[in-house]
Image (cartoon, grey):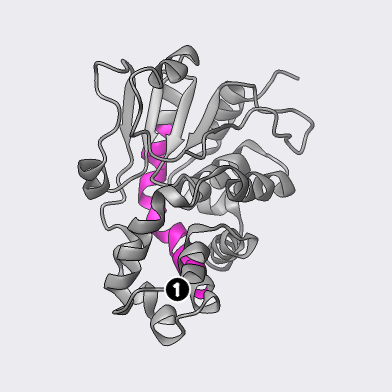
Amino acid sequence: MNFRDLGGLRTKDGRRISKSRIFRSGRLTGFAPNDFSQITKLGIRSIFDLRSTNERLKHPGPDSDQWHGNYVGVAIDADIRAKTSLFSPLVENPTPSGARAVMSSIYRSFPETFSPHLRHFFDGLINGGTPLIIHCTAGKDRTGFVVAILLSALGILDDDVFDDYLLSSQVMSLKELYDEVSDLLTSRIGHPPSREVVETILGVDRQYLQASFDEIHRTCGSIGAYLQSSRIDHAQIVELQSLFLESR
């Protein structure tokens, strides 16, 4: 679900991300017997799983019989969507507008939530081996934020960073996660949400990712300063660019 190649995205200095090096996805579960052969054919050497411990226990990833490679867990154990306070706008206003406010609130929390994990993530990108897959459950929110930060570090054009994020609206299936999100929202707001509210939570919107970037600029001043505050130094960024970008 929501699987795609980041290859071809352009940098500000005219280079592009090499094809078939970085992939992003929703959770890697529910494979039929022959499905994982498609992943194997891509030569995947590393999988970066951004899901919480509880999510991994409920929906385990590929086992050692299916895939042999480097598994990097970047667990967000305090599952962001389980934080009741973030759902206050929807309790007060159980409409798509309230749902969009919830999503913006979640995305504003991403920079602080992910900052302690980014050094481990970037180290894994450099040392774990490529090609690689970055994924969470839907592959749109946590993966969307982390991939946006990675693309920014690589120097990708701002419009392309947002275009890649918004592509999730075209390639993911809402049906697969509808019941899970509906049950979660029911537990948080005290009654079953409308279909429009669930679909809003399951969607992507430019304002969501913009909320993350606005928070970074408010607290740090720039993406570069945010990376430095997360212990990502210039040498690592140069190494990432060398690893993932086409030669000049």
Give the left or right position of residue 114, taking residue 166 as reference. Answer: left
In front of the other: 243 or 204: 204
In front of the other: 232 or 187: 187
Give, as a single range, the part of the protein colored magenta: 101-123
**x and y, in percent, of residue 21 in the image:** 55, 22
Q: Is residue 110 one of those drawn in magenta?
A: yes
Amino acid type assigned to the residue bearing label 1 in the image? Ser
In front of the other: 156 or 88: 88
**x and y, in percent, of residue 234 in the image:** 55, 37
Q: Residue at x 30, y 57 (%)?
A: 79
| Residue 43 seen in the current view | yes
Q: Residue at x 61, y 61 (%)?
A: 205
Q: Residue furthest bottom?
A: 92
Q: Residue at x 27, y 58 (%)?
A: 78
Q: Residue at x 41, y 56 (%)?
A: 178
User: What residue did someone put label 1 on?
Assistant: 194
| Residue 44 seen in the current view | no
**x and y, in percent, of residue 27 in the image:** 38, 39
Q: Quadrant of the C terminus?
A: top right
**x and y, in percent, of residue 68 in the image:** 31, 15
Residue 124 lies, with reference to residue 27, above or below; the image says: above
Give the left or right position of residue 52, taking residue 150 as reference. Answer: left
In front of the other: 213 or 175: 175
The secondary structure that most of the magenta stretch takes on is: helix
Residue 41 lies, with reference to residue 106, above or below; the image says: above
